[in-house]
Image (cartoon, rainbow, N blue to C red):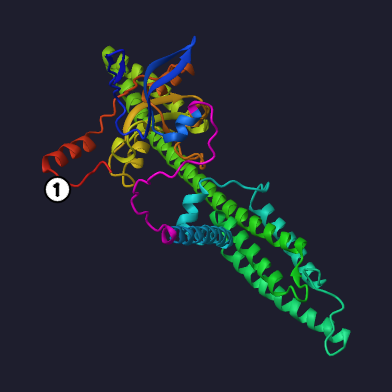
């Protein structure tokens, strides 16, 4: 409150609560007189803040009463535990890296011997050498084994350090190195011979890896004397393994070829027997109608005479056809059949038979080897059934179920596609083509299973 000439002036500043320093009014001189100005400004920084407002540098704050602070926790134990855990983490990371490296090394050293696993892994095996037949593969194996024996006889299969001394004698040292080398070579050859004796197509890679590990172990054990299996000798034994596997597979394939050839010959014998029986029956019938022809001529029976002549002409044509089929091995029937119950949907067999009655061959295929009979979708008679069958096989070559043994004539294809292929090939012998697989026994079995309920046996598996 200011008083001037008995006049009172009142100034009440606000918003200054809790501020340690404030300027309420300013008294200054101007134009030769004194003046007063109401300010009402405070500073939380205290006098230092006020001084800086007016351009005064302040080095240090005046002593101010400190605000009580909450006690701070001791972080030293926490920092120590964090440091310990960090060190443990680094140690574990290094340990994991070491273990990973050891696992990789162990996996590389493992030689897989489980045949079922190897069969699952091999997938597809091809010859790695051009072997035309079993004889050529046997000759090549014999030549390779002769080279192996020569390397052993000339002592080039294993080598060691020279200049090794025993009891101050180079001769005794050389004898010791040679004896140790012979021992290591004997160990290596025992392993190699065992691999050769047991190798099969799907185990050849495992056998090679096993022999590699044996050679590496010999190098490690003989490092002091420099004893090691010669690289060229090792290559010979690896090649022996490969050729042996190829030879065994070739033997199996030639056995399969021989079985197929015997089957083809049996089919041809059956076909010839059928032709002979058919011709015999036709000749017997021919004699009958010739007798009828003579009796009708003598009796003047014109109707009987006409019937006998017509039937004799048909018989003569049939005999000619049978003789032609018997002489021409390319004449026959191409059949298209399926067996939904045994092989599932969209699996068809396209084969060839020279039987006079082609259904006999189909009945044989479905006799005991499969649980249900085959459905016949087409029987195509052709003067060159061999060529027709080959053309159909080439048309669906990429659809073969068995991609290795091409004598297996099953294809994964729609029946409509087979019919379209026959039409494209230009054959005009297809009297009827059934695209529906009736499979009556299988369908009845499925219905019976459904009627029996969940306890019934699932016949579709």
Q: Is the residue 274 above or below the residue 153 in the image?
A: above
Could you say which quadrant of the image residue 298 lies in?
Answer: top left
Q: Is the residue 97 above or below the residue 50 in the image?
A: below
Number of marks in the rendered image: 1
Image coordinates of residue 176 in percent, x first then y, are 79, 83
Left or right of residue 425, residue 299 in this image: left
Along the line of sight, which residue is nearer the eye, 321 or 114? Answer: 114
Could you say which quadrant of the image residue 223 lies in?
Answer: bottom right
Q: Main secondary structure of the magenta part?
A: loop
Left or right of residue 16, residue 93 in this image: right
Along the line of sight, which residue is nearer the eye, 82 or 74? Answer: 74
User: Is residue 202 found inside the magenta-colored segment of the image?
Assistant: no
Q: Is the N terminus in the top left, top right, bottom left or bottom right quadrant?
A: top left
Q: Write the residue at 48% across / 53% down.
A: 119
Image coordinates of residue 383 in percent, x first then y, are 49, 24
Along the line of sight, which residue is nearer the eye, 267 or 100? Answer: 100
The local crowd at label 1, few if under 14, some if 14 to 19, many if 20 or more residues have their Cα within 10 Å, is few
User: Is residue 74 found inside the magenta-colored segment of the image?
Assistant: yes
Q: Is the C terminus in the top left, top right, bottom left or bottom right quadrant?
A: top left
Image coordinates of residue 185 in percent, x first then y, are 72, 73
Quickly name the residue at label 1: 455
Q: Write the residue at 42% across / 14% down.
A: 35
| Part of the protein shown in magenta | 53-78
Q: Write the residue at 42% across / 41% down.
A: 270
Left or right of residue 154, residue 41 in this image: left
Q: Is the residue 132 above or below the residue 82 in the image?
A: above
Left or right of residue 116, residue 192 in this image: right
Q: Secondary structure at mark 1?
A: loop
Image coordinates of residue 157 in percent, x first then y, are 77, 68
Could you say which quadrant of the image residue 423 lies in?
Answer: top left
């Amino acid at each position: 409150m200011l008083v001037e000439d008995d006049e009172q002036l009142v100034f009440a500043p606000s918003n200054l609560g809790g501020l340690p320093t404030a300027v309420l009014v300013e008294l200054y001189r101007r134009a030769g007189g004194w003046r007063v100005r109401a300010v009402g400004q405070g500073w939380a920084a205290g006098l230092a803040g006020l001084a800086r407002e007016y351009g005064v540098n302040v080095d240090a704050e005046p002593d101010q009463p400190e605000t009580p602070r909450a006690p701070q926790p001791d972080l030293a134990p926490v920092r120590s535990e964090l440091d310990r855990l960090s060190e443990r983490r680094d140690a574990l990371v290094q340990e994991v890296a070491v273990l990973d490296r050891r696992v990789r090394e162990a996996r590389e050293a493992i030689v897989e011997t489980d045949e079922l696993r190897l069969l699952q892994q091999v997938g597809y095996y091809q010859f790695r050498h051009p072997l035309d037949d079993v004889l050529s593969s046997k000759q090549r194996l014999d030549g390779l084994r002769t080279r192996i024996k020569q390397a052993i006889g000339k002592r080039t299969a294993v080598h060691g350090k020279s200049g090794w001394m025993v009891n101050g004698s180079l001769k005794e040292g050389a004898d010791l190195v040679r004896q140790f080398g012979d021992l290591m070579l004997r160990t290596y050859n025992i392993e190699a011979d065992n691999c050769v004796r047991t190798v099969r197509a799907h185990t050849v890679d495992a056998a090679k890896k096993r022999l590699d590990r044996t050679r590496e172990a010999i190098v490690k054990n003989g490092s002091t004397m420099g004893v090691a299996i010669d690289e060229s000798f090792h290559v010979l034994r690896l090649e022996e393994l490969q050729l042996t596997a190829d030879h065994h597979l070739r033997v199996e394939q030639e056995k399969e070829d021989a079985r197929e050839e015997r089957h083809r010959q049996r089919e041809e014998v059956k076909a010839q027997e059928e032709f002979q029986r058919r011709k015999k029956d036709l000749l017997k019938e021919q004699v009958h109608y010739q007798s009828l022809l003579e009796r009708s001529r003598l009796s003047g029976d014109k109707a009987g005479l006409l019937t006998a002549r017509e039937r004799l002409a048909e018989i003569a044509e049939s005999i000619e056809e049978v003789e032609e089929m018997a002489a021409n091995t390319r004449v026959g029937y191409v059949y298209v059949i399926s067996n939904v119950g045994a092989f599932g949907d969209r699996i068809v067999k396209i084969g060839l038979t020279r039987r006079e009655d082609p259904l006999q061959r189909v009945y044989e295929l479905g006799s005991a080897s499969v649980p249900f009979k085959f459905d016949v979708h087409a029987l195509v008679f052709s003067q060159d059934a061999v060529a027709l069958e080959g053309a159909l096989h080439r048309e669906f070559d990429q659809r073969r179920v068995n991609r290795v043994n091409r004598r297996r004539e099953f294809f994964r294809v729609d029946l409509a596609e087979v019919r379209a292929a026959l039409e494209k090939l230009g054959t005009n012998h297809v009297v009827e083509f059934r695209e529906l697989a009736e499979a009556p026994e299988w369908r009845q079995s499925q219905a019976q299973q459904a009627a029996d309920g969940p306890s019934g046996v699932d016949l579709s598996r």
